[in-house]
Image (spheres, rainbow, N blue to C red):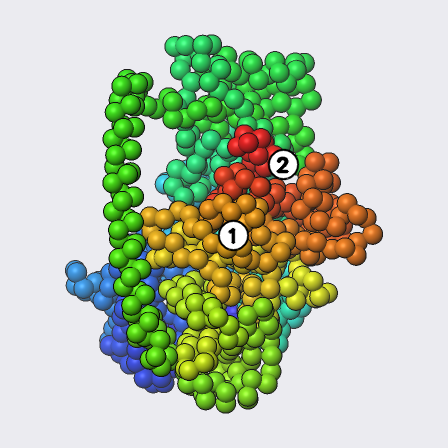
Amino acid sequence: MAFEKLCLIFLLFLLLALLSHSVVSQSSKNISLGTSITAVEKGSFWASPSGEFAFGFQQIQKDGFLLAIWFNKIQEKTIVWSANGQNLAPNGSKVVLSTDGSFQLVDPTVGQGSQNWWQSFDHPTDTILPGQILHQPAQLVSHYLPNNYSKGRFLFALQDDGNFVLYTTNYPTDSVNYAYWTTQVFGSDFSVVFNQSGSIFVQRSNKSIIQTISSLKDISAQNFYQRAILDYDGVFRHYIYPKDSKYSTRNHPMAWSIQSVTPSNICLRISGPIGGGACGPNSYCNFDGKMKSCNCPAGYSFIDPNDVMKGCKQNFVLQSCDEASSQAHLFYFNEMLHIDWPNTDYEYFKPVSEDWCRQACLDDCLCGAASFNEGACSKKNLPLFNGRFDLSFQGKALIKVRKDNSSSLIPREINPKNDKSKLFISGLILMATSIFLWLLLIVAVYLVLYWFRRNNQKLPKSSQFGPIMNLKSFTYEELWEGTNGFSEELGRGAFSVVYKGVLPNHPKNLVAVKKLKLLNDSDKEFEAEVSAISQTHHRNLVKLLGFCNEGEHRLLVYEYMSKGTLANFLFEGQRLSWYQRVQIAIGTAKGLLYLHEECNTQIIHCDIKPQNVLLDDSYTAKISDFGLAKLLKIDQAVTTTAIRGTKGYVAAEWFKNKPITMKVDVYSFGVMLLELICCRKNYDSNVEDEIKMVLIDWACDCFHYRRFDLLVEDDKEALSDIERVEKYVRISIWCTQDDPLARPTMKQVVQTLEGFMDVPNPFVLQSVTS
């Protein structure tokens, strides 16, 4: 729907000509004078006649509501216009259509509000829609963060002189700072047009097109919702969203997909003499062609992880200028290829060697980093700004970092030898006492459980999990009928078979019913899976709906995953796009991070592999099969167990009878990440070249010779994103180190996959830990 039509629709509200579809009122009625919409938790809005757009309150914070217009027929409810994002309305606020035809805000804490509480609908905030024309002068202001709609750091301006410019601002003021993209066209009577065919261009008053900014190719505009937005990160993006699943394709899934970006690489365009650049002080920017990521160099961390564009801070004490030369040995350099902070140089030397450059920076207390490129050395002082990843820059950044952060922060006198001895003896006494008490407790618990189990064996199995875990208890007869006698098999494992089922009372009807084979320890596995997954709730975990624990029957009922297992797409010729594989890797990592660190009981999955990652209609990755999961107490870091998991994905510690930690899942994820990158199994005896049989070994060889293209040689999408391929191969090798201590945590994995953290050289880490 055109933006002008949208404006007309909501102006017609003032004339009382539209129907309301508010979720808190009748489904269809005329809007009467005195009618209002209220800021409440479940939402309150008026919908347009087509239902495609809605006007009302969206809850942004716990007690903060944004008055906005949004797309109403898609799941995301994407906002296209908002009012006063810096001053959210409190719970209970109302917008009233007054008897004089004007809007008024009623703040429950103040009283009747003003008639001009928000901007006119004729003036957009950060978004324009098909059919909208911006005349001179006009502007869009980015919002601050994805969920913070206050004014942000970037400005889109169609100026009086006719020039169309993207600016950074002197945030938090509105004044412009530096132009990072412009049409370089000047004159009067210019306008920016977003037409119904999906083209965005600058035109003269005589309708002649001066410059095209974006256009749709090979698709029909009428089948897609569209929007163009100056995003919070400063990139002007053109998005589309299929209006129906029949228009969805691999390149255009049922989600917002990016059609164009302006400028083509914001990281390289923002390079003014002042300001933090695209990502803030001490950080560097990377652009993959569609999305920007901000990263901290090793030794630094984000000032505010929720607002990465504030920049990065040191995680160590800086070099003292009082004794710079004597402290040089306390520091070393992290090398970062193709990364530079070009506007922070204060000394330049050429020709010199890299060793000379390093020593010159070590001896200079003001030198926070240096760059070395083809015999040229540049010293850089802190803070570093306008950092970027740039393949055209063939040099390297040398980031100066203290070798031992802790030694510079802890006073020496608090750790004398006498205190060490006393603490050691006290610790031994406490440990011996604790062990004795624990042994007594274990014996007591064992006796109680033995007695209980012996007396409980004769009792029929019942749905004892249901009331506690809020799961539905099914009868065996219900599941027999729902699966048509367990006739349609979806998959099978060593101890279970999964069938497709239909349950009339389930919202989506289709379910997956997992039937455990009756073995000596099937009760134990059944209880483990129900216990593990019933406590979890995450977008990247398969949802357990219920179970059957009746007589000899042990069944689990899951939500149905229409696309099946990830293995089907990796190993059976149905290759997913590179972008989809990247999202699956990130989603799986986030699911594991939740199991390891964020759910109430920490869980080690123990069997991460493509067969246990399922995909829904939108190809969202969901971890399944918790039959081997191990639960950890909050204060427990390791567990012991017999060898589990699947050959090829099992970490070395399984075979060495060592304690098992969450790092076994990290190892398995690293193997699976390589399979996602290369679209092949971790071991393939059918390959012609013997050195390629074991995928991890082959990836290490490619890493050594910097030939990452060989891993994805027939994948054009991946080849066009070879920097990300290199980073992901680094992550997978890091995850699959033999020593668990050398592997990252899943939090670090997620941060590196999303570009919020640098990936260290895994072979350097291996040598350090060994």
- Looking at the rendered structure, the kind of residue marked 2 is Asp
Quarter location, residue 372: top right
Tell me where residue 471 appears, x and y as whole percent: 37, 75
Q: Which residue is mark 2?
A: 390
Q: CA distance from mark 2 to mark 1?
A: 34 Å
Q: Earlier in the sequence, mark 2 or mark 1?
A: 2
Q: Which residue is mark 1?
A: 665
Q: Residues within 10 Å of mark 1 (few under 14, many from 20)?
A: many
- In the image, is 574 to the left or to the right of 243? right
Tell me where residue 699 appears, x and y as whole percent: 69, 44
Tell me where residue 299 appears, x and y as whole percent: 47, 31
Q: Which mark is residue 199?
A: none
Label 1 secondary element: helix
Q: Residue furthest left?
A: 110
- Looking at the rendered structure, the kind of residue marked 1 is Asp
Between residue 610 and residue 328, name the one nearer to us.
Answer: 610
Q: Residue at x 62, y 16 (%)?
A: 355
- In the image, is 346 to the left or to the right of 215? left
Q: Residue at x 79, y 54 (%)?
A: 687
Quarter location, residue 10: bottom left
Between residue 282 and residue 534, name the one nearer to us.
Answer: 534
Label 2 secondary element: loop
Q: Where does the C terminus fall, quadrant-wise?
A: top right
Between residue 8 and residue 285, name the one nearer to us.
Answer: 285
- In the image, is 186 to the left or to the right of 638? right
Q: Residue at x 52, y 69 (%)?
A: 2
Mark 2 vs mark 1: give the one in front. Answer: 1
Count all numbered tags in the image, as a single digit.
2
